[in-house]
Image (tube, grey):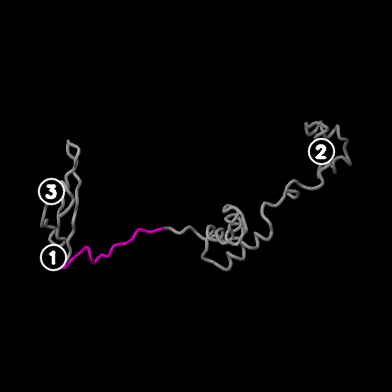
Amino acid sequence: MAVSKLNEIISVSRISWILDAQRPTIYCWMDRKNDMKATRKPRIAGSAKSQILNLSEENTTYRNRRIWALLRNSGIHVSIKTVSRVMRRNNLSLPYARHRNRTRAKYLRKPEDMNILWETNIHYIGTYSEWMVYLMSIKDCFSKRRFSYELSRSCTA
């Protein structure tokens, strides 16, 4: 480390005065052989990482949840966040799939003649007492004319 290289040139008391650190801390820094990140224990085993990479390359349409389920079913227990992290770092994650609303067929909304397409509608009307009244109507989509109304306490036409 840098402190042990400085110790060859400057004394420990001088280093502690320059860095504004106590001498036991300086000695502790000098005893460290490697960088902290190099001595860190890996979070995931190499075999699990290779399994994640193999599964994501075999199944290119699978996202992190499905690959995590495949790993879990094969007996490898890793976190779903670990799977997503490995996939993201290896550029194997898929873009987010947006769900689009269902488009209605346009020809059904514009009939060419009367009595081709009807719409029904039910309105719930609350009254001052504890029960509700239902208003049911039938409309022709071509002429926009209401054919039938029914007002009742039950919702049966």
Gap in angstroms between the C-alphas marked 2 and 1: 90 Å
Where residue 62 appears, as percent x and y from the top left, is 52, 63
52 or 22: nearer the viewer: 52
Q: Give the crowd class for mark 1: few <14, some 14-19, many >=20 residues within 10 Å.
A: few
Where residue 96 appears, as percent x and y from the top left, is 48, 57
Which label was assigned to residue 28?
Answer: 2
Instruction: Give, as a three-letter code, the residue at label 3.
Output: Leu
Residue 129, placed above or below residue 83? above
Where residue 54 appears, as percent x and y from the top left, is 62, 66
Q: Earlier in the sequence, mark 3 or mark 2?
A: 2
Mark 2 lies on a secondary structure that is helix
Q: Quadrant of residue 142?
A: bottom left
Determine contact: label 2, label 1, CB under 8 Å.
no
Instruction: Give, as a three-letter code, the residue at label 2.
Output: Cys
On screen, residue 76 versus residue 30, left or right, reads left
Mark 3 lies on a secondary structure that is strand
Q: Main secondary structure of the magenta part?
A: loop
Q: Earlier in the sequence, mark 3 or mark 1?
A: 1
| Region of the chain picked out in magenta, as a range | 99-114
144 or 11: nearer the viewer: 144
Check disc 3 and report the residue beneath it: 151
Instruction: Give, as a three-letter code, the residue at label 1.
Output: Asn
Check disc 1 and report the residue beneath it: 115
Q: Quadrant of residue 145?
A: bottom left
Q: Residue at x 80, y 35 (%)?
A: 25
Residue 18, placed above or below residue 156? above
Q: Is-magenta flag for residue 47?
A: no
Where residue 114 appears, as percent x and y from the top left, is 12, 65
Gap in angstroms between the C-alphas marked 3 and 1: 23 Å
